[in-house]
Image: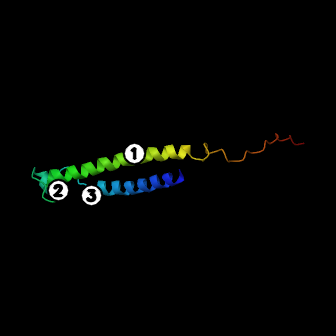
Amino acid sequence: MNILFYFVITVHVIVCLFLIGVVLVQQGRSADLAGAFGGQGSQTAFGPRAAANVLTRLTTWSAIIFMVTSLTLTVLYQRGTHSKSVLSGTPTAPASAPAKPGK
């Protein structure tokens, strides 16, 4: 169970970094100068539609994998031997007596 938890964490971090990279590589719609005048994008290697489709699919699949690993990590953490509450290990403060009125 512990090995599975660390494996899912590793996959989660790799997918997270990949997702950040794929989103940063994408251009917005009509972001270049030719898009301002209604022309076809000339800066892409696959053409304006093919590059958008590949990057869109990569973004979609990496986002799905990111969400699945997030939910899996939550379930694995809850089923582990971890404490169920944040305050379960804190010591309680001793009860103090009210102050006596002075003379």
Disc 3 crowd, CA 10 A, few/some/many (<14, 14-19, 20+):
few
Q: Is residue 17 left or right of residue 85?
A: left
Tell me residue 20's x, y (percent): 34, 55
Q: Amino acid at mark 2?
A: Asp
Disc 1 crowd, CA 10 A, few/some/many (<14, 14-19, 20+):
some
As measured in the structure, the alpha-carbon distance from the residue carrying label 2 to the one carrying label 1 is 32 Å
Callout 3 secondary element: helix
Callout 1 secondary element: helix
**Mark found first going from the N terminus, 3 or 1:** 3
The residue pinned by badge 3 equals 25
Rendering colour mode? rainbow
**Mark found first going from the N terminus, 2 or 1:** 2
**Residue drawn at 80 percent across, 42 percent down:** 96
As measured in the structure, the alpha-carbon distance from the residue carrying label 3 to the one carrying label 1 is 21 Å
Residue contact at pointers 3 and 1, CB within 8 angstroms: no
Tell me residue 97's x, y (percent): 82, 40
**Residue drawn at 49 percent across, 45 percent down:** 74
Disc 2 crowd, CA 10 A, few/some/many (<14, 14-19, 20+):
some
The residue pinned by badge 1 equals 67
Tell me residue 52's x, y (percent): 20, 51
The residue pinned by badge 2 equals 32
Tell me residue 51's x, y (percent): 19, 54
Q: Nearer the viewer, mark 3 or mark 2?
A: 3
